Amino acid sequence: MKTPPSLPPLLAFGAHPDDIEFGCGGVIAREAAAGRPVHFVICSRGEAGTNGTPAGRTAEAKAAARILGATVEFIALDGDAHLEVKAAHALKLAAIIRRLRPSVVLAPSLEPNQHPDHHRLGQLVRDASRLARYGGLRELKRLPAHAIGQLFFYAVSPDAEPATQPVLIDLSAPGIIAAWTKSMEAHASQLRTRNYVEFQLARARVCGMGAGLEYAQPLYPNDPLVFDSLTALSWAARSF
C-alpha cells in the first residue's frame, strides 16, 4: 500500500493561552486528524486575566494542545495586555517561522474592536511572515529563509470578524467537534467568566448552517487563494 504524502506543518499563533482553541480550535482538530503536524506559539501566559494564574493557564494550554494533537511553546514578548508592535517582535516571530517552516500560518484578525493584544499580534505575524523570506536580514542569518504558502486570520469573537468573505472549514467529520469541545473545556479557569464553549459552538453551528453544514469555522485569507484549476474547488456556501 502506498504511503500518503506527509502534509507540511501548520503554525498557529495566540496572544493568550486560550485564543487558538476558542478562535480556530475546530480547524486545528480537523487538520491534525488529517495527519498535518500542528504547532502553537503562545505569546503570554494570561497573567492579566481575571481568572486563573499564569502557571495554571500554562498547564491548561498544554493540556488543550495535547487534546488537539498539537505541540506548543510559550514565548515572552511584552506580557499580557502590554503587547506592542515592534520590529524586534516581528523578527522573533520570523525566526520561529524559519525554524518550523510551515506552509500555513494562523493568527488573530487585524480588527481593532477586540482585545488589543489580538490585533497587534495579527499585525506582528503578518510582518513576520514577510520577514521570514528575506534572505539578507542579519538578525535571521542563522536560519534559512522560508516563504509560507498562506496566512489566515481567525476571529476569537464576532467583533473580530473582518468584513470580507471567509474560507469556511467543514467541521462535520466524526470526532472533530468532540475534540474541539474537550480542548476548550481544558481552559476551566476561563469558563468561570463565561460559557465560552457553548458560545463558540453556537458560532460554528450558525456558520455551518449558512453553508448547509452541521458545523464550520471561518478563516480569513491575507492574500487571494490560488488554485491549479477549478477541480480543486468543491462547493460554495450558496446553493444556487
Image (cartoon, rainbow, N blue to C red):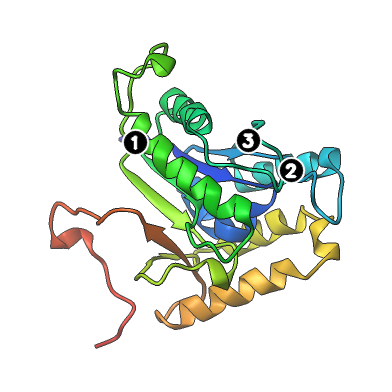
C-alpha separation, residue under disc 2 versus residue under disc 1: 31 Å
Q: Residue at x 50, y 56 (%)?
A: 27
Q: Is residue 101 above or below residue 169?
A: above
Q: Residue 136, how many percent across, how many down?
A: 29, 17
C-alpha separation, residue under disc 3 versus residue under disc 1: 23 Å
Q: Residue at x 12, y 57 (%)?
A: 229
Give the quarter of the image for residue 184.
bottom right
Residue most extreme to the left: 229
In-image side of 79 versus 236 (left or right): right
Query: Which amino acid does the dot numbered 1 rest on?
Result: Arg
Q: Nearer the viewer, residue 67 or 192?
A: 192
Q: Residue at x 34, y 71 (%)?
A: 165
Provide the secondary structure element on which disc 2 rests: helix
Provide the secondary structure element on which disc 1 rests: helix
Tag in front: 2 or 1:
1
Q: Residue 224, how many percent across, how many down?
A: 25, 56
Residue for badge 3: 72
Q: Residue 53, how many percent across, how many down?
A: 87, 44
Q: Is residue 125 above or below residue 235?
A: above
Residue for badge 1: 130
Q: Residue 130, how many percent across, how many down?
A: 34, 36
Residue for badge 2: 63
